[in-house]
Image (spheres, rainbow, N blue to C red):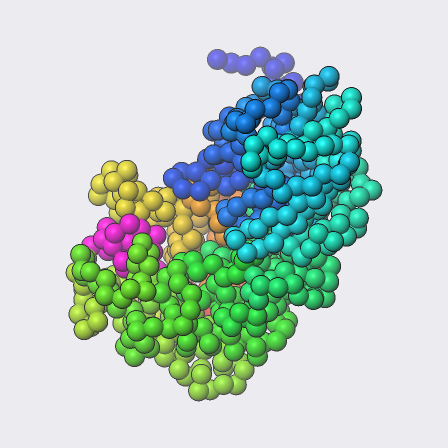
Amino acid sequence: MQLPFKFILATGLLFLCACGELKKQGAEEYIDPTIGNMAVLLQPTRPVMQLPNEMIRMYPIRRDHSDDQISGFPLQVVGHNQGTVFVMKPAIGVLQPDTWKKKLTYDRDLEIIHPWYYKTTLLDDSITVEFTPGRKTGMYRFSFPKQSTHYLICASNGYQVNGKQITGYTLFHDDVPVYLYGQFSTAAVTGLIADTLQYIRFDGAASDVTFKYAVSYVSLANARHLFDEEINDKGFDSFSEHGRECWRKVTDQIRVEGGTLAQRRSFYTALYRCHSRMVNIAEDSLYYSGYNKKVNVTHEPFYVDDACWDTYQALHPLRMILNPAQEEAMLASYVRMYEQSGWMPTFPRIYGDHPCMNGFHSTIIFLDAYRKGLKIRSLDRAYEGMKKNALQATMLPWKNGPAGALDSFYYAHGYFPALAPGEAETHAEVHDFEKRQAVAVTLGHSYDDWALAQLAAALKKPGDAALFSQRARNYQHLWNSEKKFFMPKDEKGAWIEIDPALDGGPGGREYYDENNGWTYLWQVQHDIPGLIKLMNGEKAVERRLDELFRTELGMPKYEFWHRFPDATGLVGQFSMGNEPGFHIPYLYNYVGAAWKTQKRVRELLDLWFKDNVFGIPGDEDGGGMSAFVVFSSMGFYPVTPGIPIYTIGSPVFSKVSIALPSGKEFTIIAKNCSVVNKYIRKATLNGEVLNAPFFTHQQLMQGGVLELEMTEYPDKRWWASVHAPE
């Protein structure tokens, strides 16, 4: 059907008006926290209201974006995917003991969600709920029907209400104290509906109730102090506008031109997710630490809530570009955690280290920061902690504590031993579900030890450098030259015969971790030349990469996902939906097939990162996956954290300008860039022709212009034989 010209003209004018308004408001309007709110299989993203890297986080409690009911509204989300405190729900009318069980029906089309502002209408009782976050404070605004008796219902009896004031206390994770101080805009009284069900009733004729509050992990007095300091005299709208300004500063740091509306929405939403963790829990001069279980004095931020296995690859490297001072403060927090607990953490939460996944990848982050010129406070102490982890901590997945018999075997033989399929576990300390992950552990710690060797050499510790350099090559012990995979061995050194694509139990955890042997084929970022040698040269690696993206599962997806539910975002055997695969499409650049990197990266962004509720292909992990989107959309990626070099992909925008903290600017210009024109024909950096698809961190941070000439068809001769600089 041909559309009338008037319709086309009107639509175009509306689009131009919308663009003009967006330009006036800023790129923060591209952020859509609902992107990814429907998970493929596992965890969805949550529409989090939060200031960048700040403590207070809120999202409505519901299953996912398909759920048309809300269970409650928290005052604080304490940890990423780990729990809420001080949950409340508004109500009217006569209260019953089962009122708390009643879920609140809403219409998602009437919901407004920005990182700095939330609004929804609860349809059954015609109550409007609004929220806006601060650093250690938050503000709700409830609009109740006129002439109704209105309440907040709380699932505890831990609140004290005195007129307009409210205080509260609870424990998170059984040992983290959480204090609440707040004020209502109208007087309230409280009472019990049942033993653990409390109501807060608002007297008077006011139908709008504003609730300002502060949360502290230090004390009730400190909660009151934070309240007075940050929110006491603020109005809701001005507080929300301040939040918008905070996010505008984030989006203004990377300005883009060109690309589609969908690409801009996906890009800026990913940038928002990259600022969700770590979070600063320091309260002026005090902070509670789960690492010594007490309140400590500080004169700098204290950051928690990280996941090194997920974030070392791209999120920390991105922050080293955009906000190196903040990254320095985060690494200083890691050192304090070591000093307080005796171990360098792997997944630092507010209550202490969460023994999740495998590896000590904070070592890689420290090396990356050191080589990129960041100032690491107490570097000697940091090294001491990393070395202690490497020599004395258990390598077992999902375990904290001193090394055991399996670790001693690794130190002596250079690989983590595995069991044959069906063989009973002989070590009680092995996690019942997570298993040994023998190949994944060996590969991951090879990278960690390489990083430690590099730091040892920089700190002039030749004995340590030699020891850890030798251990960095341990991955070679599990290379099966016949199968062309990294395969498990038993304690006698014999190969265990498995199908690396399918075996290992749930998530392949007996040998790999959340992914199969195809993904772990490429987990040697620290020694790509060594991997190329194992695979018999560049052409062989190129063919193997092609196989990865083209080899079929050999079974229906539901059967495959029954075994590997984390391996989503599939393209052949490649999994875009899980962290170990992020660097893989860029490996073509290392074997003279750069055009295939350009093709694959564009395909992956287009396939799996749409600007809708399905727009995240796996567990996003608080910025880990989003950092891949930010880097890849700009057109480059840090394949090997610890080596301060970026490799070039295919930018989706015609121009990207990164405002660096020094006041300089790094600009990427992609001439003729479009959805079709994804291939690079020519590249220059500051006017000098690039003879390889790489540039250094130093070149980026000095500012300048990377200029790419894009074309419709690949120039296969361009960068056809290259070697990455070291």
What x and y, as percent, mark residue 596? Answer: 39, 51
| Residue 142 spot, x, y in % from top left | 69, 29
* Residue 286 position in % (x across, y down): 70, 62
User: Quick check: is 514 in the magenta stretch?
Assistant: yes
**Viewer-closest of 157 and 312:** 157
User: Considering depth in this image, is 716 or 503 the residue closer to the camera?
Assistant: 503
Magenta stretch contains residue 165:
no
Seen at 40% across and 50% down, the residue is 578
Above or below — where is 451 with respect to 142? below
Q: In which quarter of the image is residue 530?
A: bottom left
| Placement of 484 over or under 621, stated as above or below | below
Q: Foreground residue, 709 or 343?
A: 343
Q: Judge whether residue 258 can be spotted in this image.
A: no
Relative horizontal placement of residue 17, taking residue 719 as reference (left or right): right
Residue span colored magenta: 499-523
Locate residue 447 relative to residue 244 in the image: left or right.
left
Residue 82 to residue 37: above or below: below
Q: Main secondary structure of the magenta part?
A: loop
